[in-house]
Amino acid sequence: MRTRTISTATALAVLFSSAALVAVASGPAAADSAKLLDVKSAADVLVDGAHQRVYVSDPVEGKIVVTDYTGAVKATLDGLPDVDGLALSPDSGQVYAAVAGLDRIVSVDTSSYTQSASYKLDGAERPRTLAMASGKLWFGYGPDAEGGIGSLDLSGGGPVVALGQDGDASFYAAPELGSDPDSGVLVAGEKETSNDSLTVYDVSGPKPELRVTKSVEGGFFDDIAVSPDGTQIVTASGSPYYHPVYSTEDLSPLGRYNSGDYGSAVDIAPDGTVAAGTFSWYGPDVHIYQQGKWSKVREYEFPNTSGSSGGDTLVDGGLAWAPDGSRLFAVSDNGDGAFSLRVLTEPGKSLPALTVAAPDEAKRARSLTVTGTLTDTAPLPAGTELSVTRTDIESPGGKKLPAVKTEADGSFSLTDTPPAGGKVTYKVAYAGDSTHAAASASDTVEVSRSTPKLTLNKNGNVYSYGADVSFTAHLGTTYKNRTVEIWADPYGSDKPDKLVKKGVVNARGDLSATVDMKRDTKLTAVFAGDARYASKKATSTAYAKVKVSTSVSKHYKTGTIGSTKYYYFHKNTDPVLTTTMSYYKGREHRFELQVRVDGTWRSGGANEYYRLNADGTSTVRLEAPGRSGVRARIRASYVNGTSGDNVNSTTHGAWRYLNFTR
C-alpha cells in the first residue's frame, strides 16, 4: 500500500566484516530442560534408574514427588511429615524415606508408588539422613545434642534395627551420611554445626568399625559423596569455596575441585565423574570433573526465573546422577520460592569450542579458504575429523564436502571453489565422542554474481480510469532462472501490494501482465536471481485519472451557440449541478465557475471544493444572476493532493455551458 510522496531515496551501505562463530554443543544444550516442581521445599533427590524415575522429598509439605526423566510428575506421596533423606534398595524395588515427623523409615514400592512398610526405630528420634552400604540401610538420627547413627537390616526374616552405631564419634544432631554400597565405606559429618570433623566407618563386617575421625576443611556439611571405588570422599559445605577431596583410609587431603563458591551439593556417577554443586547467584551452579582431575569438564549456570537480581540457585544436596551417567538431575529454587527439577543431559561430556571464519567476499568459480579452530578443556588429538557442508542457491539443503582434520593446536583450514554466487554458508561440525559433546559452527561468504538486465515499460504514462493496461518486463541474459514476477502496488492505504503475474519469460525475454488502472500504481518486476546472476528489481509508475461527469438540471431548454451546447435558464432560476466522480474516502471535487466577459472566459470566483457523498455524487446549487444576457460555464475536477487524497492523477471534467435569459 502506497502514499504518493516526492522524495529522494538514500541507500546506506553497511559493511559487515566476517566474524568467526563459536558454537555451543548442539546435542546436550538443546536437550537440557527444566520443569516446575509442586513443592515448598526440597531436602533430597534420588534417581531410580531401573524405572527411570526421580524422587524429591518435601519436608515442609510432608510429601515425596515422583517424576519421570523429563520432569513430568507420575505420583505424589503424601502423609510424610518432615520427610527428609531418601535411599534406593539394591534391587531398585524400594525407595526408603527418613520421616522425621513420624520417627520412622517408610518404604515405598517403586512399581506402584504405594507405601509397602513403615519401620519403627527402637526409640531413635527424628531420622533425617540415609545411606545404603553392605546391604544395610544406615540412618542419621536425633534431635539437638542427641545425634547418632543407626542401621536397619532387612536381609533376614524381619527388620533388625541397631542404634548407637557411631562408636567413639559424637554428633550434635543427625549427621550427614555418604557411602559406597559395595566397599562398605560409610562417612559421617556434622550437618547442623560448624564442627569440621569427618568420620569414616568400615561397615562391611557384622559391626561397624570406626576407621578414622579427623578435622578437615568445612563444617555444616550439606552433602558427602564417596567414589565408586571406595577410595575418595568429596564434601560440600559453606566453606571453603571449593569441594575438597580426602582419602577414605586416613582422611588425608588428595586435592580439590575448584568450584569457586559456597558448596551445596556433590554426587559421583558410577564411572567416577564428579558433579560439584554451589550456591551461586551470579555464577555457574554445577561443575563437572573427571575423578582425580582438577580442571573442569563443563559448567552449568541456572537462569533467573524470578524478579530477583540473581539467578536460580541449587538447593542443598540437590544433585543426583542417573546410574548410566547420561543425565544429571538438579533441584533449584528462585527468589519467589519456586522449585524446578533440571535435567542436564550428557553432563560428563566436555563442550568443545568450534570457530569458523570465511572471507567477507569472494569471486564465483575462484578458490577461497575457510579457517577455524576446535578447542576443549579435555584436549582433542591432532587429526580430529570435522565434517564440512556448503549451502548455496543450487544446494539449499547443503552439499557435503570432503572432511578436514585438525592440527596439533586444534586449527584447521579448507579450500573450496564455490560454483554458485550469492550467500554461501560453510558449516563445520564435530560429531563428538564418549567424552566430548558434539559441536558445530558456520560462517557465510558473499560470492559475486553478474548483474542481469531487467526493465519494465510504460513508466510515467497516464491512463483513463479503468483502462486495462498491459505492462511488459524484459529480462536479459541469466544462467538458469528465467522466472519473473510482476507486482502492482496501488496508491492508497487500503490496497495491498499484489502479485499480478509470475512466470517464465518468453524467447524474447518478455513477460506481460494486465492491470486495471483505477489508481496511480507502482509496478515492480522482480527477478530472484540464480547461481550466476544476482537478483534484480525494476519499477514503473503509471497514473490513472478519475471518472468524472457533471449533469445539469432546472434549465428550460438546451441549444447551441456556434458549435457549443448551452443549457438555458431564466435569469432568476438557480441551476442545480450534480457531479459524479470515482469515490475515495474523504475525496472532494473542485467546482470551477467562469463568466463570459467581452468575448473572454474569466474566473467567476467560485473555485471551491465540495465533499463527495458515499455514492460518489455531489450536488451544487448555483445562484441565478437575476439578469439576462449572462453566459457562464462550470466544471468539476479532481486535483491530486488538494482533493483530499493523492491516489489518482489530476482529472478535469468537461465544461458545462449556461445561458441566462428573461
Image (cartoon, helix red, strand yellow):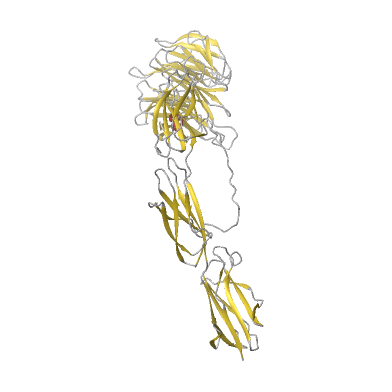
Between residue 509 and residue 191, name the one nearer to us.
509
Q: Between residues 278 and 315, which one lies in front from this camera angle?
A: 278
Q: Quadrant of residue 480?
A: top left
Foreground residue among 616 and 420? 420
The quadrant holding residue 429 is top left
Q: Left or right: where does residue 458 sit relative to residue 620? A: left
State which quadrant residue 135 falls in. top left
Instruction: Classify 169 as above or below 102.
Output: above
Which quadrant, please, contains the C terminus? Answer: bottom right
Pinpoint residue 374: horizontal percent, then vertical percent: 48, 23
Count the numbered circles shown.
0
* Residue 199 seen anywhere in this rendered image of the structure: yes
Q: Is residue 56 visible?
A: no
Q: Percent from the top left, x then y, of residue 458?
A: 49, 59
Judge whether 68 appears above or below 197 on screen.
below
The residue positioned 49% from the left and 15% from the top of the image is 293
Near-viewer residue (342 or 21):
21
